[in-house]
Image: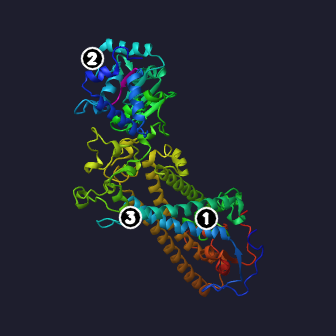
Amino acid sequence: MRGDEFSFRDELAARGISRREFMSYCAGVAALLGLPASAAGEVAAAMETKLKPAVVWLEFQDCAGNTESFLRASKPSAAEVILDLLSVDYHETIMAAAGHQAEQALASSLEAHKGQYVVVVEGSIPTGADGAYCTIGGRSALQIAKEACKDAAAVIAVGTCAAFGGLPAASPNPTTALSVSDAVPGIKTLINLPACPVNAENLTAVLAYFLTYGRWPATDHYSRPLFAYGKTIHDNCERRAHFDGGQYVEHFGDEGHRLGFCLYKVGCKGPVTSQNCPNIRWNEGTNWPIGCGHPCIGCAEPNFWDRMTPFYEHLTGVPGFGAAADIDRIGLYATAAVGTAFTAHALVQLGRKAYDKRKAKVSVATATAAPAKTTSPARAKPAEADKPEADKPAPAAEKGREP
Amino acid sequence: MAAPAHPPAITTPVADAHDASPDLEPIYVWDLVVRLTHWTIVLSMLVLAFTGIDIARPFLDAPSGTGHFQTGWVRIIHYYAAIAFSLAVGSRILWMFLGPRRSGWRQFLPVSRRRQRELIGTFKFYVMLRPRPPHTVGHNPLAGLTYIAVFGLYLLMILTGFALYSVSAYGSYMKMWSFLLPIFGGAQGARWIHHVVMWLLLGFAVHHFFSALLMARVEKNGGMDSIFSGYKFVPKGSERDDDR
């Protein structure tokens, strides 16, 4: 465990975070976690007194967007400081060490805090070509992940790439990229924090919860914490009343768009995306996509790049008809085709019937002497007419017995 | 079982406009449960398709202003229709095992040698390779097999619908269906399946209506009316145990 060099309060002071800011941060975390107001004190006490777990931050196949997400804040917030403190052992983007020195830091951290460190994984893990698509210090991402996750107290997969495979795993998935849960099966405690990128508030809240209570928050069937992913964006959306009321943006820039109507018809994936964006927003609560008039693209959902595209349409097209094929049009045509086929069938049947009738009449009138079986009103194939088959057309004399 | 074994024959011959007709006798084919579930499914499906299309691509827009609950009502109607639909489908599937012979699962799965043979015969009729379908009183074997697929689609519709409902079923027992979401590839995957299968079922409905019309015309057994009255009319003395 770290924390023997500085007290947390010293570190906060050194970074210019006031006590008031710290307390308001703790209250915010408690609220985000769905805890009562009294829990803010517990969170603060835990942060100040408890030893913080060592965190190693592994970065694999991704754009470093999750790292960027919390480094890009306009001013250093308590959340960033906490992340910074926690991730100091190994983080490729922000650590000072390089080369073998850095790899040494990782190895010694894993050794020193065996069974107690937390692994944060950013990016998907390529498994194609024996992992050759992503190697660090001569070892593949898969090797590194397996080794690091083996003795971890918990693994937190941040961002959609780590949680679900994300962009690298999108069709045709050239590197056979997998999510952490698929690439490294059997992790005892895995927490998925999907989103592109992860909202840093959710990551710090998970860590704060662990510091405060010594266990991890409750998760759903995708191992996502319920406090952040328990509700859909749609159900917390500030534009929801316009959805229920049937008031929609038809085109970007139209009257409805200017009035802040629901973005559902321009492809908003809020109804099928679970995240707390409407509540905590982004960039220190400044705004979020729907708040500024752009539909949700469902970045926090599994396979979002394949399933949520086209982003400005309700549904993905039908395979084989092109990505942007309109299901409704195909469905309508198919339904119409069925109707046409049956109408054609009925017409042919009626035509046949009329033909049979006339032929029967003619044969009765002209060929009374002829044997009945050769003049049976066979239609279609003359070759089959003489075959004594079960499905041979009924002779004229038996017509009345037809069902 | 539910039907009288030998209902009184109708003495007046059912006249055929063109052909001399022998006496026909009614056979009680579709019992009350079959007919009720059939019409519940038809009506709820029509409501579900109409409201479902509006939910996917809202066309019943409300004008601007406050106090509207347009899509809200459409969704509520969709949910109630879904309850009726699910119960009807569930009841019908149970009835396949509990109900009388002609409602039973053997009408759907062609397990007997005869049904398998006539399956091909019916198919030949549909593709115009033979002029008349084989003699059947209940479902013809091909129709029965088709309904197995249709019931599969019904179940898929119900399960994707439940999975989608579970997304927002906070604090409700319906939340238990959320385990289905990963199977369908998340809520968007479930939504896609739900939408595409709706079109498959609408296509089937058109097919079903036309082929019922066609068969009623070819078989002249009152097939179209049978789903209202329960009775089909077959020539006296013709085989009744065609479904064995």
The percent coordinates of residue B130 (x first, y second) are 59, 68
Drawn side of residue A203 relative to residue A386, left or right: left
Q: For the residues marked 3 and 1, what is the alpha-carbon distance in whole angstroms?
A: 50 Å
Q: Which secondary structure, mark 1?
A: helix
Q: Which residue is mark 1?
A: B122
Q: Which residue is mark 2?
A: A96
Q: For the residues marked 1 and 2, what is the alpha-carbon distance in whole angstroms?
A: 77 Å
In the image, the segment drawn in magenta is A54-64
- Residue type highlighted by circle 1: Thr
Q: Is residue A22 above or below residue A230?
A: above
Classify the position of the C terminus of chain A by image quarter.
bottom right
Residue at screen point 74% across, 69% down: B2
Q: Which secondary structure, mark 3?
A: loop
Say which chain tag 1 marks: B
Residue A333 at least partly seen: no
Q: For the residues marked 2 and 3, what is the alpha-carbon distance in whole angstroms?
A: 57 Å
Residue A140 at least partly seen: yes
Say which chain tag 3 marks: B
Front tag of 3 and 1: 3
Q: Which mark is residue B231?
A: none
- Residue type highlighted by circle 2: Ala
Q: Which residue is mark 3?
A: B69
Residue at screen point 30% across, 28% down: A19
Pick whichever of labels 3 and 1 is earlier in the sequence: 3
Say which chain tag 2 marks: A
